Image (tube, helix red, strand yellow):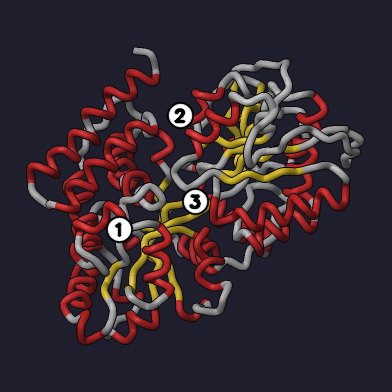
Amino acid sequence: MKKKWIALVLIGAMAASLAAGCGKKSTGTNSADGSAPAENKTAQGASGADGAVYYLNFKPEQDEQWKALAASYTEQTGVPVTVVTAASGEYETTLMSEMNKSNAPTLFQVNGPVGLQNWKDYCYDLSGTDIYSHLTGDFYALQDGEAVDAIAYTIESYGIIVNKTLLGQAGYSVEDIQSFEDLKRIAEDIQSRKDELGFAAFTSAGMDGSSDWRFKTHLANLPIYFEYQQDGIESTEAIKGTYLDNYRAIFDLYVNNSTCDGSALASKTGDDSRNEFLAGEAVFYQNGSWEYANLTEDGTFTDDDLAMIPIYIGVGDEANQGLCTGTENYWCVNSTADEKDIQATIDFIDWCVTSDEGTKAMAADMGFVIPFDTAQEPENLFVKQDAAYTESGKTPVAWNFTTMPSEEWKNVLGNALTAYAADQTDANWDAVVSAFVENWAAEYALTNNQ
């Protein structure tokens, strides 16, 4: 049964996994200031390696869990493991800053082939490591020929999280929502009765840096995915914007049926959106499987209260559409670190994905589906629902946003969306289209030195 469960979840992510390469570079020791480790301390690791680990974590929602797991590893092995978590939306900037310091991260991450290009000279070849041998497929590694430059460590899903209790109070069930038209009809009805019901349809579509990634990246994935599907491609140097009218329709639905006016979204944060959902102020909340612990840890919600449904935008076979499933979380070991720190880092991540304590923490505490043959089944409801969608024959939506040409492309799109949310004119939407299409070609050319 466990193998069946792993297979069902991992099938959904295969389409989103692409291969890319990165060069090799060695020599140098690293140090970081401020919140980063001040110096390397000699310790005896699990495989006899002296060294220390500095992990620059991408995921703020798992900050406490990673620090707890690191502390446990240090207690057991004596190897210092420091976890520093970048602020939401600031990972690339933080990584660039930390890599310029003398005690740089020994473990960092990239979001896929495009993100890897900036760090191609900092990747240690993981092809001969134990952790690589436990991967369930090479499609979870970013490779350069025989060299393995990065390894995925979690497969995730996102969609629209539903408060089933509030939806029921409004007279509907999850089963009533099978398409964009269903979602639109129900959301607009709930919003029209918000004073009577005491809640809105959607949480705020915040465009602050802690929240805008949900729309300039995750929501933007939908028109990219369907364009790629129609054209039979996996990436492009010039997006056409075939389904941007659909992108506008779903974004309009969020903004116009929300807990706040569109003009307030520029300052609305990710915490605002989550807290609105926790407080029962809205039925729908676009986010991912990583939010499960935040919604259930204090008992506010149980599994009976929640569901995750696909993000429908009125394209494709909606009756057979699943959740958006994939990964943008690839571990890279810093090849410029001292050899003893490189080995200590490899030992640590191997322990995380093979030991009972590590795999339990990643499954139960962090809610991760890890793409390794040692994985434990997570308790995360949204992960289980993703597997159920796949088992029933629904097709997961691949994470094609990993092919977005640059962070700057996302930022320009985010700025245009923020302006449009505040004033939903055709002219402002034209600026969104320009940011999406014209800027894609421009950023692709810059990124690829064309």
Q: Quadrant of residue 163?
A: bottom left
Instruction: Give the secondary structure at mark 2.
Output: helix
Residue at the left extreme of this rendering: 426
> Viewer-proximal residue, 52 or 125?
52
Residue at image position (38%, 63%) is 272
Residue 333 appears in the figure: no
Q: Can residue 5 be seen here?
A: yes
Which comes before the other along the chain, label 1 or label 2? 2
Tag 2: amino acid: Val
SS of the residue under disc 3? helix
Q: Secondary structure at mark 1?
A: loop
Provide the residue designation for mark 1.
Answer: 205
| Amino acid type, callout 3 | Gly
Question: Percent from the top left, x then y, of residue 79?
Answer: 84, 42
Q: Residue at x 23, y 56 (%)?
A: 250
Tell me where residue 89 sits by quadrant. top left
| Amino acid bearing label 1 | Ala
Q: Quadrant of the C terminus?
A: top left
User: In the rendered view, does 73 fall on the left or right side of 270?
Assistant: right
Estimate the spatial distance between the alpha carbons at disc 1 and disc 2, rounded to whole Å.
26 Å
Q: In this figure, which residue is indicated by the disc labeled 3?
A: 12
Q: Which residue is mark 2?
A: 114
* Percent position of residue 426, x then y: 7, 46
Label for residue 289? Answer: none
Label 2 crowd bin: few (<14), some (14–19), many (20+), radius 10 Å: many
* Residue shown at 54% from the left, 73% from the top: 296
Closer to the camera: disc 1 or disc 2?
A: 1
